[in-house]
Amino acid sequence: MHSDVSCANLRVVGGRVAAIFDVDSLCLIDEPRCVASMAVHYTYTGDAPLPSGEPAWAFPSRDEARAFVAAYEVARGRPFDRAERARLDAGAIYALAYTSRCEVGHSGEGGMCAELRAAPDAYFDG
């Protein structure tokens, strides 16, 4: 997995990933943790705010993250089992916490901090 999930670290050609940048962020982790991290970060680009001051992008909502996982399960050909779902939830909370720490360290509290505060333990259920 590329652990620094960002559209800014990918080159997409013809609808397919053609290159991954920032290779120092490659790691070996299990599938549920990888999918959870992707689900809560897949819209991240890191682009500067628009001239109006509005963000150029937003992190996915919990519903969007859940839809990402559902679409992944369809592409995977089977749903995550109970143990995998527990890992998926843990991976999401970890990813939210990591990004919240980054926000506080760089720019004060951002959107991911609020998302983490509101996140239930079973992030992808309910």
Image (cartoon, helix red, strand yellow):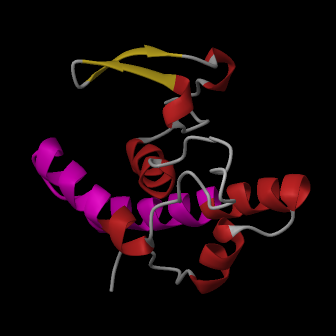
- Residue 28 in sight from this viewpoint: no
* Point 87% across, 65% down: residue: 108
Relative height, residue 54 to residue 50 (above, below): below
Residue 94 at x, y percent in the picture? 63, 60
Q: Residue at x 38, y 63 (%)?
A: 65
Q: Residue 79 vs residue 2: left or right?
A: left
* x and y percentages locating residue 85 in the rendered image: 36, 65
Which quadrant would residue 68 be assigned to in this image?
A: bottom left
Left or right: 35 with respect to 56?
Answer: left
The quadrant of the rendering that contains the C terminus is: bottom left
Q: Over which residues does the magenta segment extend?
A: 67-95
Answer whether residue 75 is magenta in the image. yes
- Number of numbered discs visible in the structure rendering: 0
Is residue 64 visible from the viewing direction of this image?
Answer: yes
Residue at the farthest front position: 52
Location of residue 97 (image quadrant): bottom right
> 80 and 24: which one is in front?
24
In this view of the protein, which residue sits in the foreground, 66 or 110?
110
The magenta stretch spans residue 62: no
Looking at the picture, tell me which residue is in the foreground, 16 or 77: 16
Residue in view at x 62 percent, y 16 percent: 23
Counting from the top left corner in percent of width and height, residue 25 is at: 65, 26
Q: Where's residue 62, x and y in %?
A: 43, 73
Going by the image, does 59 lie left or right of 111? Answer: left
Image quadrant in which you'd find residue 113 = bottom right
Q: Kindly report the secondary structure that dominates the magenta region of the rendered protein.
A: helix
Q: Is residue 77 left or right of residue 107?
A: left
